[in-house]
Image (cartoon, helix red, strand yellow):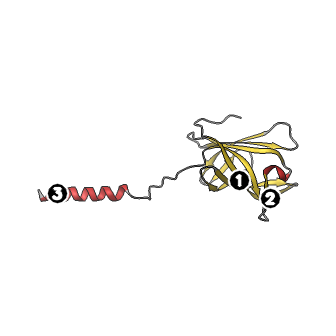
Amino acid sequence: MKKLLSISCFLLTTFLFTSCSNDSGITVKTYFGKWESTTIKLKDGSTVKYTEIGTFNKNEELEVFTDQYESAKLVQYYSKEIKPTVKLGNVSDDFIVFENTNDKRQIVKVEQNELSLVTKISINGQLELVQINYTKIGPPRDEEPKK
């Protein structure tokens, strides 16, 4: 009986310590959903509305899907173009990488309704490193994006 009791205590202790462990490697991914750009933080530290930099005439829309590839779709409205530019990509580590372009955006902040990405964009004809801030405008979808 003592053996059975000691084995039970050992198993119970092992179970309790492993079930409470926080090193499971599971990251809560709150970047899923549909986002709209709101502001841009420039390299000098100032913050302006997204459309005030002159490159875009409407806020861009970013959607990160919950499909197996963690796909992403970006729609940009350039001032000098009639149709919006659509880019597809996926999330890799702390980056959203869009295919067929050199557009790689680092996820620097993600909360329930706020997302911030660091990337390079053209401002007045020059490529500048900026932080684009987004507000969540829609829930995540489990499907692959289409252009």
Q: Nearer the viewer, mark 1 or mark 2?
A: 1
Which residue does the image show at 75% across and 47% down from the upper left? 101
Vertical arrangement, residue 146 with respect to residue 23, above or below: above
Category of crowding for the residue at label 2, using alpha-carbon neighbours closer than 10 angstroms: few (below 14), some (14–19), many (at least 20): some
Which residue does the image show at 12% across and 59% down from the upper left? 2
Label 2 belongs to which residue? 128
CB under 8 Å between callouts 1 and 2? no
Which numbered circle lies on residue 133? 1
In x, y percent, where is residue 42?
78, 60
Sequence-wise first label, 1 or 2: 2
Which residue does the image show at 40% across and 58% down from the upper left? 21
Q: Nearer the viewer, mark 1 or mark 3?
A: 1
The amino acid type of the residue labelled 2 equals: Glu
Give me the C-alpha separation between circle 2 and circle 3: 67 Å
CB under 8 Å between callouts 2 and 3? no
The amino acid type of the residue labelled 3 equals: Leu
Quadrant position of residue 77: top right
Quadrant position of residue 147: top right
As drawn, is 4 to the left or to the right of 46?
left
Residue closer to the observer: 41 or 4: 41
Task: Say which element carries label 3.
Answer: helix
Task: Say which element carries label 2.
Answer: strand
Give me the C-alpha separation between circle 1 and circle 3: 58 Å
Q: Residue furthest left?
A: 1
Which residue does the image show at 86% across and 40% down from the upper left? 81
Label 3 belongs to which residue? 5
